[in-house]
Each structure stands twice: as structure tokens, then as C-alpha cells.
Amino acid sequence: MKKTLNLIFTALLSVIIFAGCQDRTDLTAPSAQSPKSGTADFTRYVSIGNSITAGYQSGALFESGQIYAYGNLIAKQTGTSFEEPLISDPGIGGRMKVASVSPFAISVDPSSGTPLYLTYPAPYNNLGVPGALVYDVLNATSGTTCASYVFGNPATRSSNPFFDIILRGHGSQFTQTKLLHPTFITIWIGANDVLGYATSGGFSPSAPTPTATFQYLYNQMADSISSLGAKVVVANVPDVTSIPFFNTVGPMMALETPWSTLKLLGIPGLVYEQHGEIIGTGVADSASLLTGKVLLTLEGSSYAPLLGKSTGQFYRDNHYPILPPGIDTTKAFGFSPQNPWPDALILDASEMQTAENSTNDFNNAISAIAAAHNWGVVDIHTIFNQMRANDFAGGTNYDGINFTTTYVTGGLFTLDGVHPTAQAQGIIANAFLQVINSKFGASYPMLNVATLPNSLILAKRSALLSQYPYFENGAFKHLLF
């Protein structure tokens, strides 16, 4: 079974990589396009948001990914100019790349790119900042005035450099939008208000933004944006637990552990810490992992090979000064209550419910506030969930390409398991354009998703970088949209 899955995975990955090597960088719209169509006017267009808006891919922000940000794709289709805070490849953040196809392994590029247009005299049209929360649209002007720093733990918080690179000390996303006198604005913000909680396995001290706070901040933002007189379309918050970051390690672990006899019941009982615990009381068998009753994070890929061993590797990697009371690393890792699978690497049922409740509350608030301001709404939540549901029927076809939400081979998500590929950015751009055309009587053309690359990055040298056949140890980190 393991060899078969390896062969299938490698074959699919090879097809994707070689297809992605084609030169498909021409983003010209099908025909000359006026910025005005119906009652929509893209003469001066601004895109507000977070890392997806910025064009972040595979753990970094870099030029060859930024040019496929959905805002830039929309700008090409509407015939308007669109300046972005481009960063030379390999970008900033630690870009992930495929280091070996067979066996599949990932490495992180230790080098860094350089911001190319820091002296650009006006605000950028793409103001999306990786890590931005709703609070930040009006309030963050730098890496030390953003929500994650202002409200973070003083002992562990750090400045977010993307705020400084993109905003350049000239004011918040809103302030700079106002300076551009926009005629049209797209906004996609709010996912990070729940995602940070989820990617930390619910272990982060930063719980999802309280619903009342989210509603207040979003409404405050909406009132401010509406004062600018521009047409606006917003997107809601996707189900953050439906991305490959949460749906890859558990099923693979369940199907490929050496303890498996019937394969579907392969793990004798993964013992894990439930929310806030030290001694593990949760138990998950392979069926639980396959059906998503608990979700293991992609970071857990580094520790899957250690199951059953007497190890404290997790605590060393995370710089624990001493072991938590009651933890005994001489016990079998993941199979003993005294050496359980860590809370930080799993979403248990209660944590999944917390994330779902927050997402639903946020989307209800977005829907009501958008309606009150006569804004268009892109229902990304439904679109993403429908695509995941289509996986069981073979996938979702766009422009002759079949997509699934499967990690890497599905074509929708980059190597970090969180951020969309260029082709997925095209799907997102089309979702915005469909709402724009419908709400404002416009006729902007749709993108042909097949003309966009799939965004996988192949390292120059292939090497066996991991004992585990899918992920290199240490390759993954907490990520925000």
C-alpha cells in the first residue's frame, strides 16, 4: 500500500511539475477592455486584505507569485493599472520548494529577496498584508502596531515585517486607500481572526477574535470604506479547517503506519492531548483520522515518523526549558498518556467546533454589514466547501483542468498547505468578477484558468531530505492568510 501510494503521488506530482514549467506569464486580457462596464468603474482600483490578497505562496511573498494575486488578475481583466509591492524571488518568508520528487520531499530556501519598489511615490494598489486581521485595516501602520503585536504576548511576540514593506509608514490600509481616491475596492479580510487559533492546534493563547469584537471592527471598517464613495465587493471567510494543512497528515498516517493490518484500522490508538491538557486523554484510531473527527496539522508531518519511539523531540524543537509536569519521554510517543501527541499539532473536536462557530459568526456579520452598505459579497466559504465536497466525485473542473483539495497534487494549494496556487488565484478572481458583473451590470471577461501556472517550485538539486516520504523535518511553520 505504501509503495503504491508513493508511486501514484510521485507520478501525479511529476505531471504537475513539468506542466508548470511551461511559460504562461502573459496575463493580457482577451481583448482591449475599458475600466468602466455597467456601473462598475475600475479606473482607480484598490485591493485590501491579507496574504492571499498579497499573492503569498509556499511560505513566502515573492514576485513570481505576486503577479498572480487575484487583485492583479482582476485588474488585467478590467483593463486598469495595478501597482504591487513586488519582492524579488525567492521573496521573504522562507520559500518552500520541491527538493525531491521520488520520494517526495520539501526544503526551505534560506536566501531572501529584496523589495523592488519601496520608493514608489504613491500607495500600492495591492495593499494586502500577510498576517493582517480585521483590526489592522484601520489601525495597523507598521509591524509593531498590528494586532498580532499590540495584543500579543510581550514575551513571544515579534514584529511583522510585511506591514513595514507594504505600508512603508504611510498609514494603514484604509488611509492609503483613501489617498488613491478609489473608484472600486475589493476586500477579503477576516480569515486570520480564526486561522491563527486553528493552525496552532487551538494551542495558541490567541483565541479567535470574539464575535462582538469582530462585528464592531468590521462595521467600523465598512463605515470608513463607504465614506470613500467607491463601489465595493467583499469576500467572506472560508472554512479554515478544510485546507490541506489540516487534511493531509492524519489520513496518510492512518493508511501508511507499519502497525496496519487492515489499513483502515492501522493505528492501535493515537493518544493525544485534548484542549489545554498535558497528560493525554484523547484517543484516535485510523478511522477517526480518515474521517476528520480529529485533524492533525501539516507541522505534524515532522513527528509522524517518531510514533512509538521513546522521544522528546517535540519539546526540544520547541525550546521547552523543562518538560511539562507528568510528561515522560521514555514512554512510547503518541501511544502513551505520559508522552502524547501534542495539543499544538492537532485540532480535537471541541477546537474544531470553536473554529467553525467563529467562522459562521464572522460570515453572518459580513453578510449583514455588506447588505447594509450595498456591497457585493463573494461567498468563498461555499465555493471552497463545494470544491472539497466534489473531491469525492473526482474533483472540480475549470477550463479543462480537474482540481481537488488534495495536498500538492490537487492543484489548488501551494506547498504550505494554506495559500492558493496561481490557478486557484484565477478561480478566486473569476468568483469576484462574476459578482461584479452580476451586481453592477458589467461584462468583464472571465480568466482562462488553464493559462496560469500551477505554482509548484522545483529545487535545482533533488536529494533525499527526509526519512518520512512526504515532508522534510522542520519544513512547516505557523501560517496566516
Image (cartoon, helix red, strand yellow):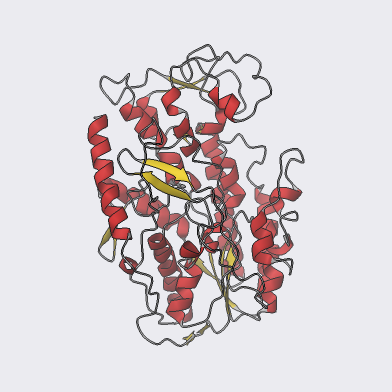
Task: Examine the rendered structure and indicate whether residue 264 appears above or below residue 90.
Answer: above
Rendered location of residue 238, percent (x, y): 49, 53
Along the horizontal axis of the image, is 160 left or right of 337? right
Q: Nearer the viewer, residue 364 or 402?
A: 402
Residue shown at 65%/75% (left/top)?
120
Is residue 31 among the parts visible in the rendering?
Answer: yes
Q: Nearer the viewer, residue 290 or 465?
A: 465
Rendered location of residue 217, percent (x, y): 69, 58
Rendered location of residue 174, percent (x, y): 68, 69
Residue shown at 53%/17% (left/top)?
339
Give the quarter of the image for residue 259. Answer: top left
Please state, as top left, top right, bottom left or bottom right, where the N terminus lies in the image. Answer: top left
Residue at the limit of the structure toward the front, as seen here? 461
Q: Nearer the viewer, residue 176 or 386?
A: 176
Q: How many marks?
A: 0
Residue shown at 51%/58% (left/top)?
56
Is residue 274 among the parts visible in the rendering?
Answer: no
Give the quarter of the image for residue 343. Answer: top right
Rendered location of residue 210, percent (x, y): 67, 47
Give the quarter of the image for residue 106. Answer: top left
